C-alpha cells in the first residue's frame, strides 16, 4: 500500500483505497448511480465500470473515488481498455480527474482524459463525433485560458490507451499514448500553464462513466456500456529534468566506461547503478565502470537516479553498449640481462603487463626452443656456446586475448 492509502473503502487497488459511488446526484442526468456497476479488481488487477439500464428507461452510472484526500503535485497515470471512438453520444467517459467539492471556485478539477460527444447528436439533427480532452476547470467566470482551459482532440479506435499527467506549480502536462505504457505512439501532448492552474487542496481521484442529458439522442434508452481500467499510479512531487544518460568508452575487458548523465535540475543528487544484460552488478555504483572478465559477451547499461527535496525521484537508463569483447593485454617486449658465458645466469625482464596477468616463459637457442627451459631465469650450458639466446614471454588473463612477446636475440655465448 501507499504511504497514505486513505481510509478503508469499498476495495483496495494500486496502493490506495477506493469508494464505489452509491449516492445520487450530478453529473448523471437522472442522478442515478449503482455501486454494483464498479467491479472489484479481477485476477489481472483490472477494474471495470459499467452503465446498466435494467428497465430500458432508467440507466445507472458508475463512479469510484479515492478515499485519500490531497494528492497534489506529481505524476498521474492510467491505462484504459476501451475503443472510445465507439462511445455512445449520450455517454461520457470521465477518465481520471481530480476533484475537491469544498475548494471554491474551481474544485481543483483537472481532467486527464475525458471522452464524449458533447453538445448535439440526433436531437439536433447533427452528427457530433466523439472527442477527448485534456484540461482543467478552475473558474467558470473567467474566459478560456484564464479560468478554464480544455484542449480536445480526435479519438482513435485503439483499444488500449495510456494517459499521463504531470501537475506542477503553474503547469499541467498531459500525454496520451497508444497501447500500454509510454512506448506506444504519442497521440496527443498538451501543456497548459499559467497562474490559474489549480492549486493542491483536498482533491480526490475519480473515475466515472455516466449519461448526460445534454448530449442529444436518447439518454433514457442508452444501451449498456463499459470501460476497463487496467492501471493507475501516482508519483508525488514535481518532476525533475531527467535526460537519458549515455555511455562512452570501448566495450572491451579492461577498458573504462563512463556514464554521462546529461543536465538534470540544478541541485539534483545523482546515483549510478550498472547492469549486465539487465541484471544489477553488485558494487558497480560509480559513474565509471572498468570492464571485468565477467562482462565479456554481455551488454551493459547504466541507470542514473536523481533525487531532490520536493521533487519526484526519477531514474533514467542508457541504451545498451555493444557486446563486450576480450580485452587487449598490455604486453611489453621482454629484455635479457646477464653475462653471455657458459655457467652464467640469464634473466628475462618482462616489463609491466596488465594487472593480474599470469606469465610463462620459454628460452630459445638460436631460435630453437630449449626443452625444459621454462623459468624466468636460465643458466647457460656448454650446448649454448657460440649460439644466440632469446626468451618468449606469454601472458594470460581471464577476459583478455592471450599475448606473447619475444625478446631480441643476444650476442653469441662465449
Image (spheres, rainbow, N blue to C red):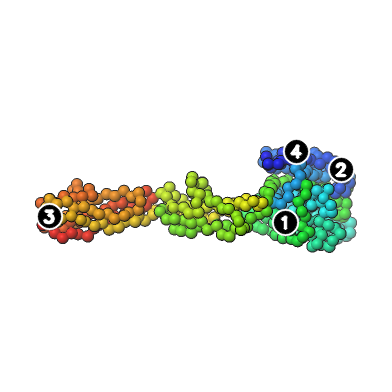
Residue 384 x, y percent position in the rendering: 13, 54
Q: CA distance from mark 1 to mark 4?
A: 27 Å
Q: CA distance from mark 2 to mark 4?
A: 22 Å
Residue 24, which numbered label? 2
Q: Which residue is mark 3?
A: 341
The residue at 87%/45% (across/down) is: 25
Mark 1 vs mark 4: give the one in front. Answer: 1
Q: CA distance from mark 2 to mark 1?
A: 34 Å
Q: Secondary structure at mark 3?
A: loop
Mark 2 vs mark 4: give the one in front. Answer: 4
Q: Which residue is mark 4?
A: 7
Q: Secondary structure at mark 1?
A: loop
Residue 169, which numbered label? 1
Q: Earlier in the sequence, mark 3 or mark 4?
A: 4
Report if the CB atoms under discs 2 and 1 are less than 8 Å apart: no
The answer, for residue 313, to whether it is visible in the render is yes
Amino acid at each position: 500500500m501507499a504511504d497514505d492509502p486513505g481510509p478503508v473503502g469499498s476495495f483496495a487497488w494500486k496502493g490506495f483505497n477506493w469508494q464505489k459511488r452509491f449516492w445520487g446526484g450530478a453529473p448523471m442526468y437522472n442522478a442515478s448511480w449503482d455501486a454494483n456497476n464498479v467491479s472489484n479488481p479481477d485476477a489481472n488487477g483490472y477494474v471495470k465500470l459499467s452503465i446498466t439500464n435494467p428497465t430500458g428507461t432508467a440507466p445507472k452510472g458508475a463512479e469510484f473515488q479515492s478515499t485519500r484526500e490531497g494528492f497534489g503535485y506529481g505524476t498521474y497515470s492510467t491505462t484504459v481498455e476501451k475503443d472510445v471512438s465507439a462511445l455512445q453520444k449520450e455517454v461520457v467517459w470521465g477518465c481520471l480527474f481530480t476533484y475537491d467539492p469544498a475548494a471554491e471556485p474551481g474544485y481543483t478539477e483537472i481532467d486527464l482524459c475525458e471522452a464524449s460527444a458533447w453538445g448535439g447528436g440526433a436531437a439536433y439533427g447533427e452528427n457530433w463525433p466523439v472527442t477527448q480532452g485534456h484540461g482543467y476547470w478552475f473558474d467558470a467566470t473567467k474566459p478560456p485560458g484564464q479560468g478554464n482551459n480544455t484542449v480536445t482532440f480526435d479519438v482513435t479506435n485503439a483499444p488500449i490507451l495510456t494517459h499521463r499527467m504531470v501537475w506542477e506549480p503553474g503547469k499541467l502536462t498531459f500525454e496520451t499514448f497508444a497501447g500500454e505504457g509510454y512506448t506506444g505512439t504519442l497521440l496527443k501532448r498538451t501543456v497548459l500553464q499559467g497562474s490559474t492552474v489549480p492549486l493542491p487542496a483536498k482533491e480526490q481521484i475519480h473515475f466515472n462513466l455516466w449519461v448526460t442529458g445534454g448530449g442529444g439522442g436518447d439518454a433514457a434508452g442508452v444501451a449498456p456500456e463499459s470501460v476497463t481500467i487496467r492501471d493507475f499510479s501516482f508519483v508525488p512531487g514535481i518532476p525533475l529534468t531527467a535526460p537519458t544518460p549515455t555511455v562512452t568508452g570501448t566495450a572491451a575487458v579492461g577498458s573504462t566506461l563512463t556514464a554521462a548523465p546529461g543536465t538534470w535540475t540544478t541541485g539534483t543528487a545523482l546515483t549510478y547503478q550498472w547492469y549486465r544484460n539487465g541484471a544489477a552488478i553488485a558494487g558497480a555504483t560509480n559513474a565509471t565502470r572498468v570492464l571485468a572478465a565477467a562482462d565479456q559477451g554481455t551488454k551493459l547499461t547504466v541507470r542514473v537516479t536523481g533525487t531532490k527535496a520536493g521533487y519526484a525521484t526519477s531514474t533514467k537508463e542508457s541504451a545498451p553498449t555493444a557486446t563486450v569483447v576480450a580485452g587487449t593485454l598490455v604486453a611489453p617486449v621482454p629484455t635479457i640481462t646477464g653475462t653471455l658465458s657458459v655457467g652464467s645466469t640469464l634473466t628475462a625482464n618482462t616489463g609491466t603487463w596488465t594487472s593480474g596477468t599470469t606469465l610463462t616463459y620459454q628460452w630459445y637457442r638460436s631460435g630453437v626452443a630449449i626443452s625444459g627451459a621454462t623459468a624466468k631465469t636460465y643458466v647457460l650450458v656448454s650446448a649454448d656456446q657460440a649460439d644466440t639466446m632469446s626468451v618468449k614471454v606469454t601472458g594470460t588473463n581471464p577476459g583478455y586475448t592471450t599475448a606473447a612477446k619475444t625478446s631480441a636475440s643476444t650476442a653469441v655465448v662465449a
